[in-house]
Image (cartoon, grey):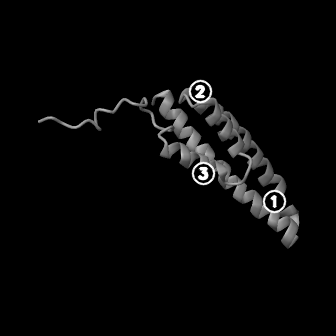
Amino acid sequence: MTPRLLAARWFRVIATFEAISWTALLIAMFLKYVVDAPHEGGVPVVGMIHGVGFVIYLISTVVAGIVLRWSVLNVLVGLVAGIPPFCTIVFEYWLQRRGKLTTRSAGKPSAAAAPSRG
């Protein structure tokens, strides 16, 4: 597996995990503050999991930006996308739509995409 492919896959997995951990944290906070659930609604445990996921997301954004040669602006937007809930998914989708998570070099069609002359 090439470093570019590994960086792209790792980034996508971590961005998805970060959004899922946000969901779990929001549910735990609802249970703690609205429902008044016992054990603080799981906020301490889920909060720690989300915090670790957030830090890993930030690191994976910088690493993916370097390996996949994103612009500095794209990396900064990716870092900020980790703050609001679910924006990591939106950012990952935006990157995918613009071909920034592909392993091919920009402007060079792959052999599979080239038309055959037979």
Choose top left, top right, bottom left or bottom right for residue 55: top right
Mark 2 or 1, nearer chain start: 1
Return the x and y of residue 43 as percentages of the image width and height: 82, 57
Measured along the vertical axis of the image, is residue 50 above or below residue 72? below
Choose top left, top right, bottom left or bottom right for residue 67: top right
Q: Name the residue under label 3.
A: 90
Quarter of the image that includes the C terminus: top left
Q: Measure how far apart labels 2 and 1 are at the Cα level.
A: 36 Å
- The amino acid marked with disc number 3 is Val
- The amino acid marked with disc number 2 is Ile
Q: How crowded is mark 2: few (under 14 residues within 10 Å), some or many (20 or more)?
A: some
Relative depth, front residue between 16 and 96: 96
Look at 79% across and 48% down and name the residue there. 48
Q: Mark 1 points at which residue?
A: 42
Q: Residues within 10 Å of mark 1 (few under 14, many from 20)?
A: some
Q: Name the residue under label 2.
A: 66
